[in-house]
Amino acid sequence: MAFEPFTAAHGMGIAMAAAIVIAIIGFRRKLRENAAWNRAARYGLAAFLVSCEAALYIWYAITDNWGLHSLPFQLCSIMMWLSAAVLLNRSRRLYEVTFFIGMLGALQALLTPNLDAAFPQFRFFHFFLAHGAIIGAGVFLTAVEGYRPRVSSVFRAIGWLHVLAVPAAVTNYFTGSNFMFLARKPATASLLDVLAPWPWYLLQLEIVTLVLCGLLLGIVLAADRVFTANKRSSSPMEAD
């Protein structure tokens, strides 16, 4: 069975991914205040990300599906490893990359999946849970650990995106593969469908990525202002 977007199964997949994010936001205070809970959640989420990739490789081996597509050069595959790493080492520079590139890439994948497996196949669950965990890692470091992206973070993250694209582009050139969709648009529906043909959509993506990173930064800044305003309004008024 082939995956069909915008169906009940697609909605269920998004709900599974959203459950990871909702759980982190819902327990954020407990995770901030309790060091043991924090450590267990961070390590657990990192282990889950690594397990997702390990399970995929095991599935490739069991089903004899090894091929060029199994190389870890897709953006979200890279982000799974980097998200696990930043949860373990709490690197603020690595956070910038996973927050912008990881979250935006995973969100786009969830909304317009490039997926060849339908419910209830393994690849269906792997796809939605793994991408949800990537977003969850960014949310954890932002909502629980208190990390915040800056304007300069946007440009550093985009710079690292170009660095990560180099091995993918080289592999595409020599093998005819399509890692990070640098060689051609995906066969399934995606944001790229509204952009110009190859190679011009690659230039347009530079602008799209900058705008989306700016939008994500604005959401965090707006949320901080709302939270601060609510905190002030709920605190007792000082006597004159």
Image (cartoon, rainbow, N blue to C red):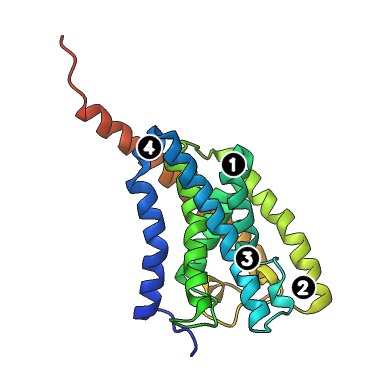
CA gap, disc 3 and disc 1: 30 Å
**Percent position of residue 124, x then y:** 49, 76
Q: Do the CB atoms of the residues marked 1 and 2 lie less than 8 Å apart? A: no
Q: Kindly identify which residue carries mark 4.
A: 224
**Percent position of residue 71, x then y:** 72, 70
Q: State the image quarter where residue 199 is shown.
A: bottom right
Q: Kindly identify which residue carries mark 2.
A: 172
The residue type indicated by label 4 comes to Asp
Report the side of 203 relative to 41 (left or right): right
Secondary structure of residue under mark 3: helix
Write the residue at 51% across / 68% down: 109
Question: Tag 1: Cα neighbours inside 10 Å, few (<14), some, or many (≥20)?
Answer: many
Front residue of 235 and 196: 235
**Percent position of residue 117, x then y:** 52, 82
Closer to the chain start, of discs 3 and 1, is 3
CA gap, disc 3 and disc 2: 24 Å
Label ID, residue 143: none
| Quadrant housing the C terminus | top left
Report the side of 163 relative to 11 (left or right): right
Of the two numbered discs 4 and 3 in the rendering, the one whose residue sits closer to the viewer: 3
Q: Do the CB atoms of the residues marked 3 and 2 lie less than 8 Å apart? A: no
Closer to the chain start, of discs 1 and 2, is 1
Question: Tag 3: Cα neighbours inside 10 Å, few (<14), some, or many (≥20)?
Answer: few
Secondary structure of residue under mark 4: helix
Q: Is residue 52 visible?
A: yes
Q: Kindly identify which residue carries mark 1.
A: 153
Of the two numbered discs 3 and 1 in the rendering, the one whose residue sits closer to the viewer: 3
The residue type indicated by label 1 comes to Ser
Label ID, residue 54: 3
Q: Do the CB atoms of the residues marked 3 and 1 lie less than 8 Å apart? A: no
Write the residue at 69% across / 50% down: 160
Closer to the chain start, of discs 4 and 1, is 1
